[in-house]
Amino acid sequence: MHLLHGVVLDVKTIKMMTLYSNSSILFRHTIVSAGILVGIACGIGGCKSTYVPPVQSTAKRDSLLARSFSSNGQLQLQEDSDVTNVNPHVRFGSQDNILVADFAEFQLRVYDAVGHLLHHYGSKGREAGQFSVPLTSVLQLSSGTMVVTDFGGTIFQLDSGLSAVMRKTETDLLPLYSATIMNDSTLLLIGRPRSVRSGEPAPLLHLFDLKSNRITRSFFTAPVQPFLAPAAVSLGITSAAIHADTIATVFALTDTIFLFNTSGAAIGRVPIPFRLFSYIKHPAPSGETVADRERWLREISLITDIFWLRDGSFIIQFYRDDEPRKENGLLIMDRLGRVRMEALDTPRLIAMDEERTQSRFFFASSGREGMRVWNMATYPAMDSSH
């Protein structure tokens, strides 16, 4: 089981990313940019929002989470003067090691299963051993080789001890949001081709051959209505999960799981039966101020992640940035689209590990320790009826 996700932004917002290491600040500026674009798309005469705030009690949320997940303690990641977890993108490597590419810190890390720091490599800069562009993913091939991507479209290959870069490949993707391993010779990349002008439809998923060092196929353009096309560039998040020979993909502005085979051919789709999700139905009214559009866009939920469990179930994570409140939500559904759980104001789900007998999940803890101390849980809960 492999996972990947990435934030789809326009060229103007890419420049912002070098200025904002805090993802929530970046997300807010992205929303402002998208609000301007959506307002333009609406045109003279305008449209009106149909937003209705979802409501769920804290007691209901806690009950749903307790019935779905069993608490399994905490994991504390070791830090020192050179290592601080700020915005970790997480995968799992050999021997239960935890692999981290920290977007904000321009750094790679390898932890053992209990959070001890084994290796780290990189910092922000242009000297040897540094990265000049934020890192978006780190993966480990069966050979032990580490494969790393950065936001600027570069793929690095490092030795298993993160001591040196062995190979560096530039792709046509800018941005390159994330990557995952399909097999030892193929990566699945999320990114926008440089050759596609901002605002035009662009394929977001790409098969990259590690032997020939080139993209062999591109597919999956943002599936939105024409009036949302500008917002799809600036306010789109794409996530995908691979299970056996099928790729499942979600896009921020839609309520559908799109299925592809490993060659990139579409093979089906599954509606996501949200009840607590607010998505764009109409563009923002024209003639409003930027502050008004920002307020309107803060009411919109966006799909951020899809996780595919071994029993065939999907977990969909969604997000709403209602400044200063930032709210995540989770929905669990089966392959037929039947909801098992939907909850609002949930802890941020950082990663899933499917390599053990029972699925393990890692949630950010609350407060300042959120990215260093993770709450662990298993699914399904031991006493779950599903």
Image (cartoon, grey):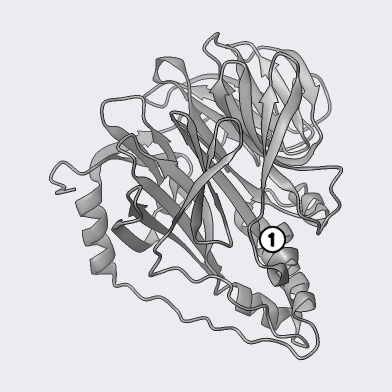
**142 or 102, nearer to the observer:** 142
- Crowding around mark 1 (Cα neighbors within 10 Å: few <14, some 14 to 19, many 20+) is many
Task: Name above or below for residue 118 compared with residue 330.
Answer: above
Return the x and y of residue 78 as percentages of the image width and height.
46, 29
Horizontal side of residue 381 vs 140, given as left or right: left
Residue, far bottom: 45
Q: Quadrant of residue 210?
A: top right
Which residue does the image show at 66% across and 55% down from the upper left?
222
Quadrant holding the N terminus:
top left
Is residue 313 placed above or below 180 in the rendered structure? Answer: below
Whether residue 29 can be seen here: no
Q: Indicate the secondary structure of the residue bearing disc 1.
A: helix
Three-letter code, disc 1: Ala
Q: Is residue 57 left or right of residue 384?
A: right
Q: Position of residue 157 (x, y in %)?
A: 68, 17
Give the image location of residue 367, x and y in percent. Answer: 44, 54
- Specify whether 198 is left or right of 85: right
Residue 39, image x, y percentages: 75, 78
Kindly tell me whether residue 369 is visible in this rendering: yes
Residue tagged 1 = 232
Q: Is 82 rendered above or below residue 200? A: above
Give the residue displayed 40% in from the left and 37% down from the top.
352
Residue with the most extreme top position: 143
Count of numbered badges drawn on the protein: 1
| Quadrant in the rendering for residue 61 | bottom left
Which of these two is toward me, 47 or 97? Answer: 47
Residue ID at (38%, 23%)? 113
